[in-house]
Amino acid sequence: MSFNALYTDLSGYYDLMCVDIDYPAQSNAIHRLQQIFGNGETAHLDLACGTGPHVRHFIDFGYASGGLDINQPMLDIAAIRCPEAQFTLQNMGSFEVSASLDLITCFLYSIHYNAGIEGLKMCIASVHRALNSGGIFCFNAVDKEKIDNALFVKHSAKQGSDLFTFRSGWHYSGQGEKQSLRLSIEKTDADGTQVWNDEHPMVAVSFVELVTLLEPDFEVHLFEHNYEKIIPWDNTSGNAIFVCVKK
């Protein structure tokens, strides 16, 4: 099954797949970073917003929040969750907005869904155009040079009488600008077990390369991938939160 088909078919299970994600902590951490580094305004857009859980929290914080995604079934769910928000079907690599923004977010490593370095450059340029002066771009990323192909995360969750088991892990060949997110989804019900295996193509980039791409247009700050505490990145870990202030 292709990536897009899998993504569409599982739109109804997306929240179940992400049940172990602490959306309140993630949203609150970026809200705090916006208060520290931002321009004090509240026009917000979430890139690759999925079903809108982060957008919901930012609305509750008092932001004028919206989102974009490439998957309409996800956006349909987001619109039910956040009727106050505007959601648009757009690619984050070349999106347009009707009014300038103060905060742009991209959670869950979705920045890597840009197709190659050129696609990533286009995304950064689109973000820069969309932000007001002093606006910030916040996202999390993984350093390609620190990916351990043997590591994966796993969790199970029930929906009605169905049991789902989700596994995911990064894979990088060690060279080039392509990495992948390998995903396995197992569904067990009264009729037996079904398994979907898929590989999401993503852009591979080191933190050094990423900072180099960002610095011409942004003041870049890196923090540990810790949504409970604001801690400067230790220059060692392979995951980090990027806070990019428009110059």
Image (tube, helix red, strand yellow):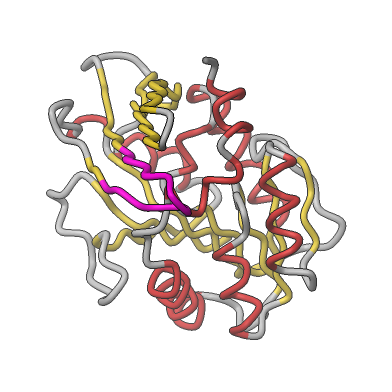
Residue 187, picture quadrant: top left
**Against 131, is 217 above or below?**
above
User: Which sits in the foreground, 52 or 102?
Assistant: 52
Q: Which residues are magenta?
A: 155-166
Residue 157 image position (x, y, % from top left): 35, 52
Q: Residue at x 34, y 59 (%)?
A: 20
Residue 147, picture quadrant: top left
Residue 247 in view: no
Q: Residue at x 60, y 45 (%)?
A: 12
Magenta span contains residue 42: no
Assign the magenta stretch its main secondary structure: strand
**Against 100, is 183 above or below?**
above
User: Which sits in the foreground, 22 or 5?
Assistant: 5
In this rendering, position of residue 215 left or right of residue 234: right
**Against 107, is 143 above or below?**
above
Residue 184 image position (x, y, % from top left): 34, 29
